[in-house]
Amino acid sequence: MALIVQKFGGTSVGDPEKIKNVAKRVLKNKKEGNQVVVILSAMSGETNRLTDFAMAMQDIPDSREMDVLLSSGEQVTISLFAMAMKALGDDCVSFLGDQVKILTDSSHTKARIESIDTESIMEVLNDDKVVVVAGFQGVDSDGNITTLGRGGSDTTAVALAAVLNADVCEIFTDVEGIYTADPNICNKARKIDRISYDEMLELASLGAKVLDIRSVTFAKQYHVPIHVRSTFTDTEGTWVVEEEKAMEGRIVSGVTYNKSEARITISGVPDQPGIATKIFTPISNANIIVDMIIQNQDTGNGMTDMTFTVLRSDYERTLKILGSVVESTEATGGIHSSDAITKISIVGVGMRNHSGIASTMFSVLANEGINISMISTSEIKVSCIINEKYTELAVRALHDAFELDKDNMAEEETLV
């Protein structure tokens, strides 16, 4: 007998008929002798619908009340799912986040899980029933309903798999796994059979939307194997697991892109100690996350330029903050900015042991006439900021250059 945690996203439970199909899939798994804990998202589009209602009430909705509102979406799906299971002749018990109890901090709309009480879940499982838990939500120490932010149902699923010591956490979605690139813009994109936690963390942070980054962090920390697969087929998906020796033979695992950032440059900044603090402290105090930062070399006149990226959602707010910053730093060149950029990235654990990967990436982009304005690297990734209009061209060119359409893991895997 295996203990399996299965998470189904909004497209998988988008209407009553789809919920019934999910119930049939879960029942099949249970009849094979497994204990099953199911995590459900709200129906596709429901969170946006509820958010629109909130915006009609307040220009900036109260965060506590937003959590009360948004958590209702998952309450609908888990209750309907439990009914569907009972209609199929099996028993099922639904739990909200505060019933389990999934204890979080008090950061409304972006809470972090602190602990999970598994006693009620294990009692139901030991009675040979299916458990269904509302994803995306929890409760703080004062009894307030909290939500985990976008992608929070993935985090709920992996966190539950960790504390239950589950054999696997299956993430069901509308795609068949994790691909070497976005198949919507690269028709040569290939499904990856196995990928390491570190590679998946990089891909998730760089724009890949199949898994929430917090869920991968939980999985890596607690050694939870994740199986990303399609709700609508029985095809084997992608396993996210501990790094394996064979993975080093795959130099680049995937190409991804992120259009959600903006670039800002402050020109003519005095090149002296404390300038970076003057620029970035007010931004940090506004809870704005800065990603890439480049400071140009002093050209001899005691001045430099400072360039960095922020989320597009924080773009206008950052520019307003910088108005007073420019004055305090006595920057002479003003502010230059653009939100028409893309961060294009290649990721692979094999980069640790192979040279020339970055230069190949730069050459490929240059040959396509694509200018690079910023570069960032880590041990297993290289990222470049380019003009947004070249996104699809860059993805396809890099995918071809690193031959990601070929299963270059096959030979290594047979030797393990």
Image (tube, rainbow, N blue to C red):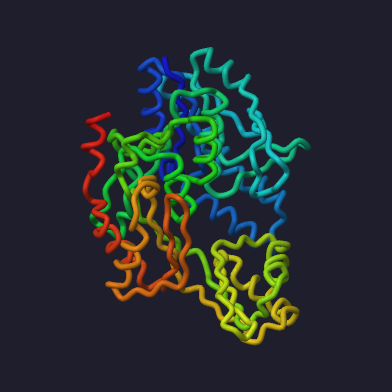
In the rendered view, would you say 390 is above or below 53? below
Residue at 42 percent across and 70 percent down: it is 386
Residue at 72 percent across and 49 percent down: it is 64
66 sits left or right of 260 in the view:
right
Q: Residue 16 lies in what quarter of the image?
A: top left
Q: How far from the left and from the top, in percent, is residue 288?
A: 65, 62
Q: Is residue 411 visible?
A: yes
Task: Return the residue nearer the eye: 224 or 86.
Answer: 224
In the rendered view, would you say 14 is above or below 167? below
Determine the residue located farthest toward the right in the rendered image: 142
Determine the residue located farthest toward the top in the rendered image: 127
Q: Residue 53 lies in what quarter of the image?
A: bottom right
Q: Is residue 157 visible?
A: no
The C terminus sits in image quarter: top left
165 sits left or right of 72 in the view:
left
Residue at 56 percent across and 81 percent down: it is 336
The N terminus sits in image quarter: top left
Task: Return the residue nearer the eye: 66 or 399.
Answer: 399
Q: How far from the left and from the top, in percent, is residue 298?
A: 59, 79
Q: How far from the left and from the top, in percent, is residue 83?
A: 49, 28
Residue at 63 percent across and 82 percent down: it is 303
Task: Return the residue nearer the eye: 187 or 172.
Answer: 187
Total numbered labels placed on residues in the image: 0
